[in-house]
Image: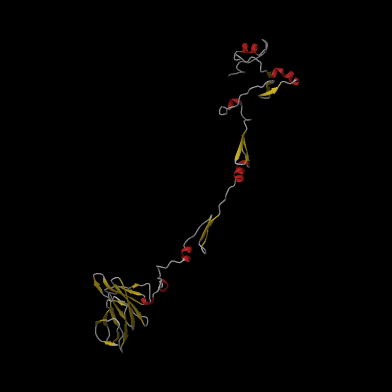
Amino acid sequence: MIQLNGNITLVVGESYQLTANNLELTMPYSEIKHSIDISLGEGVTSYKLKFLDLGNGYKVQGLINGVSIKAGKDVTLTNPTSLKSYRRGTVTYWSVEVIANPIVIEENSINPQIGLMNVDPNSIEDTDDIPEGVVNLYYLDSRARDSISATAPIDYDNATGVISTELTQYTDADVGALFTNGVHTGISFTFQANKINATVSLSGFGLDALSDVQLGQLGLQTGQVLKYSVNKWINTKLLSTELSDSALLMRRADNLNNLGNVATARNNLGLGSAALLDADVLLVSG
């Protein structure tokens, strides 16, 4: 053990006992792992550790019981210490293990940065050996899951991290029911496999109100006549029971030419000169 009573640059691998107060001990730059032990002699209450900035990127930094000390700074300690070094790039880091809780004061009175670890770098095997900080926390599944929330209709289980929702799948029958059920004015639907049939009723419309509807030809078949029933013309057969209604019948053989003229219509339809026919009531075309 080397007893010190003056300021020096420490030598790696040595043990020192301080015999004077307020000594300034310069931390050495080391390219391999080393250790240094410092103890306090009788009456010694404080000393300084100096961390160098050697220029050209070469630096000496430290971590004293979790407090990070940057290169070019001095810190004051009041307890014995065990120092161990490790190197990354051009920076030598000294992990300073203080035997008791230290009083750490930087020379420029600026509060030191709080480090993220208080462990011997030689004992670090993986991140499990490095305690997490206060703000910059490690990733955990539980933390990630707790940071997510959901509102209906999406369900979320923050214990498992499962996100789910219920979807309604329509079948052909469901789609068909949308048409066949309910009240539809003037139109009705029937559902069959792969198709929906629609029936449109025109009963509420007069022929002159169906300008947008194309009707099939009102042709008469053999043995049929066109009969006016209630308020419309219908195709019917001429039965013996209907002979009394002959005045309401129009035969296929009737002469329907030039019916726009009242006198001609009387003659062509065989109505006689005494028959009454209002002008513009009957109009046949085509």
Q: Quadrant of the N terminus?
A: bottom left
Residue 128 drawn at (x, y percent): 42, 72
Pick whichever, 35 or 262, lies toward us.
35
Q: Quick one: which residue is furthest to the front in this view? A: 32
Q: Is residue 251 left or right of residue 131?
A: right
Pick whichever, 123 or 230, lies toward us.
123
Q: Quick one: which residue is furthest to the right in this view? A: 241
269 over 126 or under it: above or below: above
Residue 203 drawn at (x, y percent): 64, 30
Residue 238 drawn at (x, y percent): 72, 20
Q: Is residue 92 left or right of residue 216?
A: left
For residue 275, what is the image quadrant?
A: top right
Q: Is residue 275 left or right of residue 122?
A: right
Residue 179 drawn at (x, y percent): 60, 41
Q: Quick one: which residue is furthest to the top in this view? A: 273
Identified at 30% across, 79% down, the residue is 76
Pick whichever, 276 or 188, lies toward us.
188
Identified at 71% across, 17% down, the residue is 246
10 over 42 or under it: above or below: above
